[in-house]
Amino acid sequence: MIIAERLLPAVLGLAIAGGAAAADPGRGAGLYEARCAACHSLDAHRVGPLHRGVVGRRAGSAPGYDYSPALAAAAFTWDAALLDAWLKDPEALVPGQRMGYSVADAGDRGDLVAFLLSVSRR
Amino acid sequence: MLIKTTPAQYSARRNFLGRSTGIALSGAAVALLAGNSRLAVAATGSPSGDVNILNVALGLEHEAIAAYQVGAESGLLQKPVLDTAVLFQSHHKQHRDALVATIEKLGGKPVNAKSNADYAAGLGAGGLKSQADILTLAARLELGAANAYIGVIPAFSEKDLAKVAARLAADETMHWSLLANALGKPVPMAALSFGA
């Protein structure tokens, strides 16, 4: 189980990055602090919703957070591929959402998603 | 001396480092776009996405104002540092007011601030036990805000709003630099470290 938890983010990150490189959740943690922590934290809603447990959670459903109507109405559950799509271009994935920030580099996205996967299983 | 500072900059830095007391507040307000007639013209055609981004920025400013308030009321900040914290808070209040005015000009509804207690809980303020703890939190928020403002610049459809985001980022960077200096943090070794 421990092996699965450690390998899964890397495997999924590999898939996201198109096989270019294994995703690195440790590097993703640093990217999260630098790029996401202005608005988000793992365990509390701030300007943006909390992130722990986001993988496997239905979009727009974290209790207590005031989502945009667009995201609240989204009918999907977050997985690695959808998180990658969201970080690449949130407006393309959910038109009318509120996040203006995106992550252009696929490797950075892979590492961030790997980090989010790792904290979603604790 | 590699870095030259103006007398005002030097004075602010010296005060923040605790070697003097009292800070001369600048009378200059950050006008941003509050009085920009061109933006008023653009209001009818500006995408709602711009308003959404500005409201996220406003949320950051609300949080920063609350964070400095929590710090100021903690009793942990010594007088020269407290003065600078209050000054930085005043900058964030000016940011807030300018953002509210801009959002309203664009036909949007500015997000309201939550209670200071809500912000404190979200920021884990209960664990702040020293002046250094507060400055570390403030530096983290300022750095995050600088990066966030830089990050959303390409997302604006209105160029003037991109410029506003850049100006806000510059203020946050200035705050972070002084906070980092006060905490004894080194200057970043690599260039282009903000927004990366």
Image: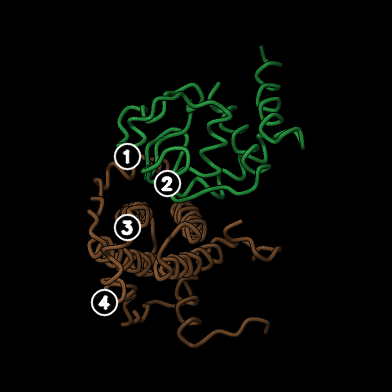
Q: Earlier in the sequence, mark 2 or mark 1?
A: 1
Subunit bearing disc 3? B
Residue at image mark 1 = A68
| Mark toward the viewer: 3 or 2 | 2
Considering every residue shown, the one lying at the far front of the view is B45
In this image, B100 relative to A57: left or right?
left
From the image, which quarter does the C terminus of chain B lie in?
bottom right
In this image, B4 relative to A45: left or right?
right
Q: How is the image coloured?
A: by chain
Q: CA distance from mark 1 to mark 4?
A: 29 Å
Dot 1 falls on a residue whose secondary structure is loop
Q: Are marks 3 and 2 in contact (CB under 8 Å)?
A: no
Q: Measuring from the top left, give residue B84's x and y in whole percent.
A: 39, 69
| Mark toward the viewer: 4 or 3 | 4
Residue at image mark 4 = B35
Considering every residue shown, the one lying at the far right of the view is A20
Residue A23 occupies quadrant: top right
Dot 3 falls on a residue whose secondary structure is helix
- Chain shown green: that is A
Q: Are marks 2 and 1 in contact (CB under 8 Å)?
A: no
> Eyeballing the image, is A44 above or below B6?
above
Q: CA distance from mark 3 to mark 2?
A: 21 Å
Question: Are labels 2 and 1 on one chain?
Answer: yes
Amino acid on which disc 2 is placed: Met
Q: Residues within 10 Å of mark 4 (few under 14, many from 20)?
A: few
Name the disc covering residue B152, or none: none
- Chain shown brown: that is B
Question: Are labels 3 and 1 on one chain?
Answer: no
